[in-house]
Amino acid sequence: MIQATKNYGTFLKRCGRIAFVGDWRYYTWMGLLTVICLLGLNAYCKQFAHGLITTGMSDEVSWGVYIANFTFLVGVAAAAVMMVIPVYIYNNEELHDLVIFGELLAVAAIIMCLLFVTVDLGRPDRFWHLIPGIGEFNFPASMLSWDVIVLNGYLVLNVHICGYLLYCRYQKKMPAKWFYVPFVFVAIVWAISIHTVTAFLYVGLGGRPFWNSAIVGPRFLASAFTAGPALIILAIQVVRRVTALAPHSNPAQPSGRTTLKAVLQRPAADSDLDLLARYLPELQFVPADVRRNLLPGLKVLDVTTGGVLLRQGETEKHSFFVLKGRVVVEREESGRHRITRSAGPGEQFGEVSALAGTPRMATAIAEEATQVLRVPADALRKLMKTPAMNKIIHARMTERLMITDRALMTLRGIVQVSMLINVFLLVNEVFKEFYSGNLHVASAKYLFVGLHGHHALVPWIWTAIALNLIAMVLLVLPVSRTLKWLNLTCVLCIVGIWIEKGMGLVIPGFIPTPLGEIIEYTPSVNETLICFGIWAFGLLCYTVFLRMAVPILQGRLSQSNEGQSDEQVAATFAVAPAKS
Amino acid sequence: MSASKTPPAANGVNRRSFLRTSAVLTTGLAALAASLKPLMEMQDFPTAEQFMQKYYKEMTPDDMAKVLKRIENEVEQQYGLRPHVRDYKPMDGVEFVYCLNLTRCIGCRKCVHACAAENNLSRNPEIQYIRVLKMPHGSLDMEKAEHHYDPPQVPEKDFFYMPVQCQQCKNPPCVKVCPVHATWQETDGITVIDYDWCIGCRYCEAACPYFARRFNWAKPQIPKERLNPEMSYLGNRPRRQGVMEKCHFCIQRTRQGKYPACLEVCPAGARKFGNILDPESEVSCILRTKRVFIQLKEEVGTSPRFFYYFDV
C-alpha cells in the first residue's frame, strides 16, 4: 500500500516535471499562453474590483460572451467523449489510440466551462452557496443546479478514466476492465446529458420565445458533434507534427547498406530465456517442454545505439523481445516520422506484423546498446498458447501511439454527418420562425435580417452560415480526404459553430427585451481579454496534459525507466540510427 | 555523482541553469503580482462575517438581530446616518395584489422616482424598478412601445401608458431557476431576494418575462442626503455590487399596513393595492366588477398578481 502510494507519487512528480521540459517551440507556445493568461487574470481582477459594469452586458442583455463560450465549450467537452462510442461500442481499433486525447480535451474544456461560469458571477465570493450540503442547492428545480452536478461529475469521470488508463500505461500494466469500462459507458451517457442540460438551461425559459423551442437540444448536440471532433482532428495533428521529425532530417532512411551490420547474432540459450522471464514473469507459465522445443529457432541479437532491428515495409516474420537496453519504434507516414512506442526489457515489438504476416508498420531502432531476443512468428504463436503469455502480449499490442490517417478519416465521417444534421436542424428552425411569422419571430428577425434598424448580429450569423455551408460542401466532397483540406474544413466548422451557437444563440434571446426594447450588445475590451485568458488557460492545460500523455502512450515515460532524465524521456526523437 | 567530483564545466552549467530558473521565477512572480494589482482598487472586500453569513431561512431570531445590527453599522459607516433596519414578516391572511388603471395613467413617471427614493435605488449606475411604456392606442404589442419618451407634456394624444414592474407572479419563473434559493415567494405573495445570498448569476433576469429584475453591475451609489433610513432586510436596504434586486411591493411599508410608494405618489389615482383575501378590499372589488382586466403575457403561465384594467 505504502509502495503503491509512493509509486503514484513518483508518477505524478515525473508527470509534473515533464510539463516543464520541451524544445523551443514548446517554451514559446507555453510562454505565449502564460502571458495571455496573465492578461486575462489582470482583466478579471479589474472586473472583480469594479463589478460586471466592466463588461458590455446590461440588464437588457444580461448574458454575453462568457455564457456564449461556456455553451460552446460544454459542446466540445461532450463531443470529445463521443469518440469513445466507436471504440467501445463498435470496436473501432483505429480510434482506440485517440480516446485519451478526446478525454483530455474534455477535461480541458470542462475546466474552461467552469471558469467561464465563474467569471460570469456577480458574487464569485459566494460560490460556496452552490455547494450541495454546505450551501442552499435548488435541486432539481433549477437547471443551473443540474449543470453544476453534471459538469463537475463529468470532470471527475474523465479525470478518473484518463488518469487511470495513463497510470496503467505508465506501469505497463493491463488496466482492470471493471475499474474503467463501466465509467466509460457512464461517461457516454453523461456526455449527452451535459449538453442536453445546458440546452435546457435556455429551453426552460418560457419568457424567451427564441430559446423556448424543443429543437435547441438536438441542435446543440449536432453542432457539438461537429465542432468537437473537428477540434480533435486539429489537435491530434499538432501532436503528430510535434512528435515527428520533418522529412529532410529523416534518420531512418535506408543507407543502402545492410542494416544488420552493427548487429551481432548468436543462438539463444536457456539463460537468455531466464533473463527474459525476469522482466516478463508470464514466461514462467510456459511449459518447460515447449520452451525446450522453441529454443533452437530463437536468436539473440546485440546492437549498438542506432542499430536498426526491423524496417517499415519489410516482410519477414519475426517478433522481438527486449532483453537489455531500449528500442524505439517509429513509423513513417505522410513523409514524417513519429515514435509509436518505446520498448524496454521484457517488452515486445514487431509482433503485430509477424503474426499477421503483413509488411512492417514501423521501424525499430536501438536507443542504447541493446540486446533483443528474436522469436519467429510460429514460435511466438506457440508461446501464446499459454494463456498468461497470450494475455500480456495482446495487451501490449495496443500499447502504442499510432495516429493513423484512417483514424482521422473516421473522425471526418463523424464531422460530416453531424454537420449535415446541424444544417438541417438550422433550416427547420429558420422555417418555423419565419414561415409562421408570429410576434415571436422578433429575435430571429433581429438575428438574421435586423430589427427596426438594429442589425449588429446580422453580419455574424451570415458569416457563420456561410462557413457552415462551405464546410458542409467540403465535407461531402472527396477533397476533404486530403489533410490540408480537412484542416481548413475543421477550422471553418469550429469558427462557424462558435458564432452560430455562442453569439447567435445567447445574444438574440435577449433582443428585443421582454418589454420590446432593443438594446444591442458588444463585448467590452476587458471582457474580451478575460475570454482570451480563459481560452489560453484551457489550451495551456491541454498542452500540459498532452505533454504528459504522449511520452506515456509512447512508452517512453514508464515506471521501468525511473532513472532516465526528463530530457531523455521528453525528447520527441531519441537517437539517429547508425549510418554505417 | 557527488558534488565534489562534479567537473568545473558542469558546475558552470548548474550555476547558469540556477540563474536562469531564478530569473524565470522572479519574472513570473512579478508578472503575477502585476496582474493581481487591480484587486487593490476593491472598495468593499467581503468581511469574514459577511462571507460566513447564514441563509435567511436558516437564521435564528438571534442571528437575524446580529445581522440587522451589523447592517445598520455598515450603513452608518458608509452614509453617516443611523438607519432602522428591520425584518418585517408577512402578515397572516394577507395576499397582496396590485391593480393598475390604464385609462387613468398619464405616464408622468412620478411612480418611477418615488420608488427610487423610497427603495434606495442606485442613482449611479441608475436602477429603476418601474418601466413606463408609451403605447399607441389599440395595441398591446410591446414591440410598438416607446420606453424613453420625453415630451414637454403628458399625456400625449393617441397614446396610452403602461407602467410595468415586478408582477409578483403566483408561478414565478425567477424563483424556479435560482440555483441557490436566493429568491422565493413569501406567504403574502411577494417574491423577495436575499441580497446577501444571491451569487449574481443573473439566471432569474434571463427567466423573467417582464424585465422586472435588475442587477447591480457596479457598486450602487446613493447620495447621503437621499438615503431612506427606514429599511428592511428583504426590502430597501442598500444593496451591494453584483447582486439582483427588484420591486418588492415596498415590503417595508406594505407589511406595516401602508401603501407602496408608487401608489401614494400617483396623481391620477391609477394605482390600487390591497389584500385579495379580504373580499371588502378595493382590489377585490375591482377584480369582481371590472369586465376586462389583463395579466401581462398570460400565455407564459406565470399568473401575475398585477392586474391592468380599464374604466369602461
Image (cartoon, rainbow, N blue to C red):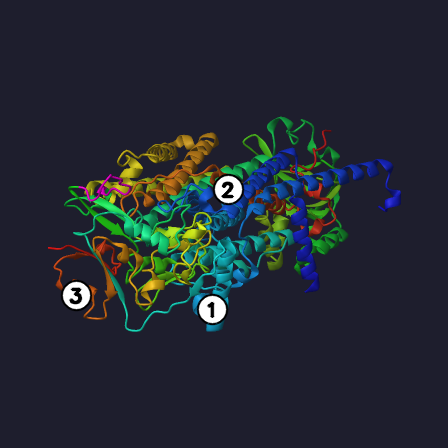
Query: Which chain letter goes with mark 2?
Result: A
Q: CA distance from mark 1 to mark 3?
A: 38 Å
Q: Is residue B150 magenta?
A: yes
Direction from residue B11 to residue A544 in the image, left or right: left
Residue B119: give its label. Answer: none
Q: Can you say whether A444 is above or below B283 in the image? A: above
Give the amino acid type for the residue marked by disc 2 in the picture.
Ile
Give the amino acid type for the residue marked by disc 3 in the picture.
Cys
Characterize the local packing of mark 1: few (<14), some (14-19) or many (20 or more) Cα atoms within 10 angstroms: some
Q: Residue at 72% x, 32% y: name it.
A: A578
**Residue A55 placement (x, y as % from top left):** 45, 42
The mark nearer the N terminus, 1 or 3, is 1
In the image, B269 versus B135, the foreground residue is B269
Q: CA distance from mark 2 to mark 3?
A: 55 Å
Q: Which residues are magenta?
A: B144-156
Q: CA distance from mark 1 to mark 2?
A: 38 Å
**Residue A20 placement (x, y as % from top left):** 66, 42
**Residue A418 placement (x, y as % from top left):** 37, 43
SS class, disc 2: helix
Query: Which chain letter goes with mark 1?
Result: B
Residue A530: give its label. Answer: 2
Q: Report the mark closest to the observer, 1 or 2.
A: 1
The residue indicated by pointer 1 is: B64
In the image, A537 versus A324, the foreground residue is A537
Q: Residue at 48% x, 37% y: name it.
A: A525
Query: Which chain letter goes with mark 3?
Result: B
Residue B285: give its label. Answer: 3
The C terminus of chain A - image quarter: top right
Q: Residue furthest left?
A: B312
SS class, disc 3: helix
